[in-house]
Structure formats: C-alpha cells, structure tokens
Amino acid sequence: QKEVEQDPGPLSVPEGAIVSLNCTYSNSAFQYFMWYRQYSRKGPELLMYTYSSGNKEDGRFTAQVDKSSKYISLFIRDSQPSDSATYLCALTRGGILTGGGNKLTFGTGTQLKVEL
Amino acid sequence: SQTIHQWPATLVQPVGSPLSLECTVEGTSNPNLYWYRQAAGRGLQLLFYSVGIGQISSEVPQNLSASRPQDRQFILSSKKLLLSDSGFYLCAWSRKGAEAFFGQGTRLTVV
C-alpha cells in the first residue's frame, strides 16, 4: 500500500464549477499537509499549507484536513481555465528535524482540466 | 524574498556522459535542500536531501550523487549517464520544519 493515494484523473469540469481534489494517507505520523499546483513542464507551486484538522481558506481555494480519517481535500470554487494543471498533495512529519530534513511524501497528482 | 534558481531548463546528453545540475537559493540561510525526480504518473521521488553544508542523505540507490559545497548551493551529478536517468529533475528548499519551494526543473533526456 502506498503511503499516499491520489486519483490521477484526468478530471474535466466546466468553467465555474466547484472542484474537489482528494488524497488519503495511511501513516498517522504525517502532521503537515500541502497542496501544490504544477503546470506542464514547470516546477510545482505551493498553494496551501496546513498542519491541523479543519479548513483553511485562501481566495478560491479551501484546504480541508481530517486526521481521524486520514483524508485531505482541496476545493476550488469558481474554477477557471487557468486552473487547468496537475494538483499534487504532499505530506510530511515535519517539525524541527535534524538528520531527517523535512522530507515530503507526494501523491501522484490529479490532472485537472477546466473547459470553457 | 526567497528565490530558487535551477539550470539548465532542458538538457540532452549521450549515454555515458557526465552530468552536473546546479541549484542555488537566495534570500535565506541554512535551508534544507532537496533533489527530486518526477516520472509521468509516479509523482515526485526524493533522491537526495541536505540539512547543511557537506551533509547529504541519499534516499534511493542510483547512478547519481549530490553535493552541497556552499550553504545555498546544491549540485546533482553523475559520472556516466544511463538511459534510465532521463526524467524531470526538481530542486527544492525549505526552512526547518516547513513547506518546500521548488525550482522550475530540468528536463533531462539521455540518448
């Protein structure tokens, strides 16, 4: 079983739709959760960063974490064609680390296409 | 503000040739530094990470090595490239215990 599972899609939605992207994980040691957006042939761009259960909102984006279910989500409201990209969830044990660095464990990414 | 630079953007190299990819970070000190490789449909695979100058940890045995000669410089190398080394290589940095920020990546094709 992979540590992090993410549906690869592709997910196709009409412009203006609400998009829900999800990841599940198996290790309760993960305490910090991130969502990245990656356009084709570019590096991932950090969208959201959270470390507690509940919701965090930033503009049209809402990150949701349910540690009891080991389930994280990213919601995109009023989706736009410019949101078409691959979305990666990333998890880390985090904290102030020494030898372990701050290693991120990534999902495989969900490809999203927002159509006009 | 902090910025990360990674070059070159694309690279085509023959099998058996050496490799050197460089990454530098500006605007912060003593960052954690990472090299990832991304294959289609497989997410990002951590290759190396470093918590300080000269401190390198390898995650996956392979034909690659990494070095950190200066605080904000991270280099990925190979003495002899294999076809299987082709991929999209990403450098990243983070503060201790926080989220990571990525460079724009190098697309390496070994022919």
Image (cartoon, coloured by chain):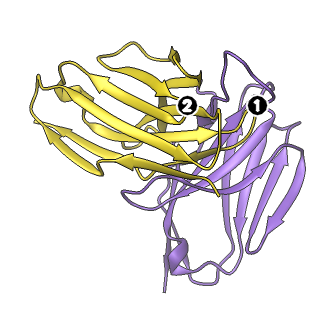
Q: Secondary structure at mark 2?
A: loop
Compared across the picture, whether A86 is left or right of B87 comes to: right
Q: Position of residue B45 (x, y in %)?
A: 47, 31
| Near-viewer residue (A32 or A53) | A32
Query: Do callouts 1 and 2 point to residues on the same chain?
Result: no
Indicate whether B58 appears above or below B47: above
Q: Position of residue A66 (x, y in %)?
A: 85, 44
**Which shade is chain B?**
yellow
Of all residues shown, which one is farthest toward the top?
B61
Q: Secondary structure at mark 1?
A: loop
| Near-viewer residue (B74 or A94) | B74
The image's mark for residue A94 is: 1
Give the letter of the purple chain. A
Categorize mark 2 by other alpha carbons within 10 Å: few (<14), some (14-19), many (20+).
some
Indicate whether B78 appears above or below B13: above
Specify the quadrant that holds the N terminus of chain A: top right
Chain for numbered disc 2:
B
Q: Quarter of the image holding residue A4? A: top right
Indicate whether B30 appears above or below A114: above
The image's mark for residue B71 is: 2
